[in-house]
Structures are given as structure tokens and as C-alpha cells.
Amino acid sequence: MSSSPASPRPGRDAAVEQAPVAPRRILVPIDFSDHSKYALAYASRTAVAFGSELILLYVVEPAVYPADLGFGQVSLPNIERELTERAGAELKELAAAHAGPVRSVRTLVRTGRPFIEILETARSERVDLIVIATHGHTGVEHLLFGSTTEKVVKKAHCPVLIVRQMHER
């Protein structure tokens, strides 16, 4: 048997060789839970180590409430605007308090379904890595609500690092 290395396949292996090792932009979806703050801490250390830009994203889900008298659902834009403004301010405070010595930190607030907004933001911002928390929901809770993290992992164009909060034993 020959011990020579296999010849590279055209196209595919070249893309693997060109994949960035050090992420330039890291996206961290935030929902203000302890889980997402832990993911932010992890992403901050990673950003410092590689000199990456950190992008914090909060997604406001549209406030839609059922209406009486059969008129369908009613959207409440004033509540969405207030939630967006409040989230933006809290996100900036969180970035200032937890991003540490990261060279560049930006905050974004979007409105929509969380996994869709995370994926669209990752593409539009040319993100190299998504660092996302998992809440570890199982059973009925997982069936009812699904997993934003799971959907992001399945559809993201870039690597996704899932951070699960460590618990004391």
C-alpha cells in the first residue's frame, strides 16, 4: 500500500483550507437570561483571544394579541417600539458590563422570530461564528416551544458554538 497522502479533491478541499481559523466577527444572541450572559462571557473571552468584533443581538418578538369579536389578531406597535428601546438600552449596559477588553462591540435589536433574525443578522453582518446559549429544555417544554438554538445550528451558514451554563455539583 502506498503511504502517500490522498490527492485533494478539487473545489471542496480548497474551501476547507480557506476557512477562517480566527473569527473576525462573533454574533451573540442575548435574551437577558443567565444562560445568555454566560454565553456572552464565553464569547468575550474568545473575542479577546482572536481580536474579534463582538455583535450582541436581541430579538423582540412581535406583540400580537388575539382580539375580541372575531376581528383576528391585533398588533400593538407602541409596545414593540417600547420593548425595542428598552432592550437597546439594556443591551448596551450589558455590553459595557460584560464585554471586557473586547476591541469592538456592537449591539443590535431586531424584531421578528428569534431564529430567523439570528440567521439573517449572521448573514448580513458577515459573521464567522455564532456563540449561543442553550437552556436545556426537554420533554413537553421542548415540544411546545422548540429550540431556537437547534434551528440556528441546523440552518446557520457559519459555525455555531453552543454554550451550556455550567452548574455546581
Image: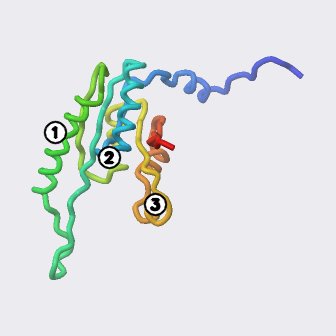
Reading the image, the residue beneath label 1 is 89
CA distance separating discs 1 and 2: 16 Å
Residue 32 visible, this orientation? yes
Residue at the (42%, 19%) spot, across then down: 49
Closer to viewer: mark 1 or mark 2 = 2
Q: Residues within 10 Å of mark 1 (few under 14, many from 20)?
A: some
Residue 10 in which image quadrant: top right
Indicate which disc, 3 or 2, sits on the residue closer to the N terminus.
Answer: 2
Q: Secondary structure at mark 3?
A: helix
Q: Secondary structure at mark 1?
A: helix
Indicate which disc, 1 or 2, sits on the residue closer to the N terminus.
Answer: 2
Q: Nearer the viewer, residue 31 or 73?
A: 31
Residue at the (52%, 22%) spot, across then down: 18
Give the image location of residue 106, x and y in percent: 25, 30
Q: Amino acid at mark 3?
A: His
Reading the image, the residue beneath label 2 is 33
Residue 127 visible, this orientation? no
Reading the image, the residue beneath label 3 is 142
Closer to viewer: mark 3 or mark 2 = 2
Indicate which disc, 1 or 3, sits on the residue closer to the N terminus.
Answer: 1
Q: Amino acid at mark 2?
A: Ser
> Is mark 3 in CB contact (under 8 Å) with mark 2?
no
Give the image location of residue 126, x and y in percent: 36, 31
> Is mark 1 in CB contact (under 8 Å) with mark 3?
no
Q: Amino acid at mark 1?
A: Ala
Q: Is residue 126 above or below residue 110?
A: above
Residue 65 disc label: none
